[in-house]
Image: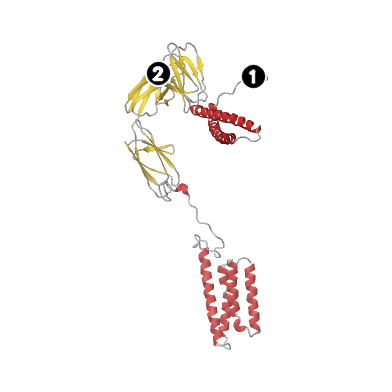
Amino acid sequence: MSRLVGLAITLLSSLALAAPYRQTSGGGCCTLVFVIIFVAIYRSGGVDWARAVGAAIFPGVFGWFIWRDRELGTGSRWFALITASLHAFFFLAGVVLALAVSAGAFNALAIPGVSGEEKPPPAIDLSKIPEDESLGLHPLSTITSDPPGAKVFVGGKERGKTPLETPLTAGENNEVKLELAGFFPATQTRMPNARENLTLTFTLKAASRLEVKSEPPGARVMVGMKEVLPRTPGLSAPIDPGETEILVLLDGYQPHRQTMALPAGDTELEVTLSPGVKLAVGSTPEQAEIYVDGLWVGLTPASVFVEPKGKHVVELKKEPYATAKKVFASVAKPTAWSPRLVDTARVKVQAIVNKARARYDKVNQALEKVQTRISHMSAPPPALERQLANLEREMEKAAIALEKAEAELKVIDEERPASRPPAPPDTGPD
């Protein structure tokens, strides 16, 4: 595109400059020579702004000689002088610009038509930029805690202890986690802007921990139906201080239950477990809570180990099912119990379905009797016709009630398939 613009400038100016000679044969030859020269320069493939302006020296020289011709009119001579001066100026400007480009003065700029090509801007090496400087991709943030001295983890990597100044990555979720012995861990997730310096303040909550040893070892430690230590001996996860019920479980041994008032900090606990007899407890559906003698011991299916002698009461609880309960006089040998839990909501809806079906059947029988009587009469009495109309209305209401109850029962069966009663056994053909 720059080559065409340069050619147009020089060609038009040359044709304008040759105008004073339009009355002479020299004028036509001069114009033709100029056109041939400039077309040849253009087709050479090297024309750019500098060369196009430099080529203007040719019409400039001819303009000078025209101005010196005293036979031409004053207006033509002055026009030729002004044109020659402009061409000389363009020529000198083109030479200066070409020298400046060749010297590298404009290397940082992409000048179409002068440099010959467009140069991309210089790339920035981000690896050489410190995290907390320059582009602001890692704004510096201040992290404090009460009490201080907590370990700071950003994205799972330890950065130091509070109070701490550390960079966070802009435009991304940064998970900041604090840990301090005797306190619950605390976490905040923040996404800073490129130039935003955050201040994150944590107030840590005091916690207790249990250092449990058991004989034999390898027991699980539960607090409030939650496992806090998978295997003894060891230090448990943080626990709320105060009155706490602790349960120690190990296969082959009776559960150990103990209530303690835990202070903030670490507390030692030593437990000796007694052998027990296995009681395998399941349920349909599963994941029912197991209580043995009022003590929560897990979820079905599970194996519970109880004392061989003495009575044991086992209860299974799961919403919205009714509580299943069984009393074992003794468990001298391994025993299993796996009841089907009764869905109380389904039982209620099933009772409604049974009642609606009985009502429907009763009205239907009465309606059939009246219809049979009327079918044998040529002129049934008005009272009988009124009775038929009433029964038909009652039949419609009973059908609607039955349909509604059965739809509700179907929803329960689809949501909780395990609540359906077991199918009767297949006895085969009679």
| Image: 63 above or below 321 | below
Hey, what amino acid is under mark 2? His
Quarter of the image with the N terminus is bottom right
Cα distance in 3D space between marks 1 and 2: 48 Å
| Mark 2 lies on residue | 256
Q: Are marks 1 and 2 in contact (CB under 8 Å)?
A: no
Residue 142, disc: none
Q: List the residue tagged with mark 1.
A: 427
Rendered location of residue 345, percent (x, y): 49, 29
Q: Is residue 134 above or below residue 84?
A: above
Q: Earlier in the sequence, mark 1 or mark 2?
A: 2
> Observer-nearest residue: 144 or 344?
344
Q: What is the secondary structure assignment of the residue under circle 2?
A: strand
Crowding near the residue tagged with mark 2, few <14, some 14–19, many ≥20 C-alpha atoms within 10 Å: some
Q: Secondary structure at mark 1?
A: loop
Residue 362 % position (x, y): 57, 28
In this view of the protein, which residue sits in the foreground, 112 or 53?
112
- Return the x and y of residue 123 as percentages of the image width and height: 50, 53
The residue lying at 62 percent from left, 65 percent from top is: 45
Mark 1 Cα-neighbour bin, 10 Å: few <14, some 14–19, many ≥20: few
Quadrant assignment, res 49: bottom right
Camera-side residue of 146 and 252: 252
Residue at 55% x, 24% y is 421
**Residue 109 located left or right of residue 269:** right
Tell me if residue 171 comes above or below residue 393 in the rendering. below
The relative height of residue 375 versus residue 59 in the rendered view (above or below) is: above
Type of residue at label 1? Thr
Q: Quadrant of residue 173?
A: top left
The residue mark sitting in front, 1 or 2, is 1
Count of picture labels: 2
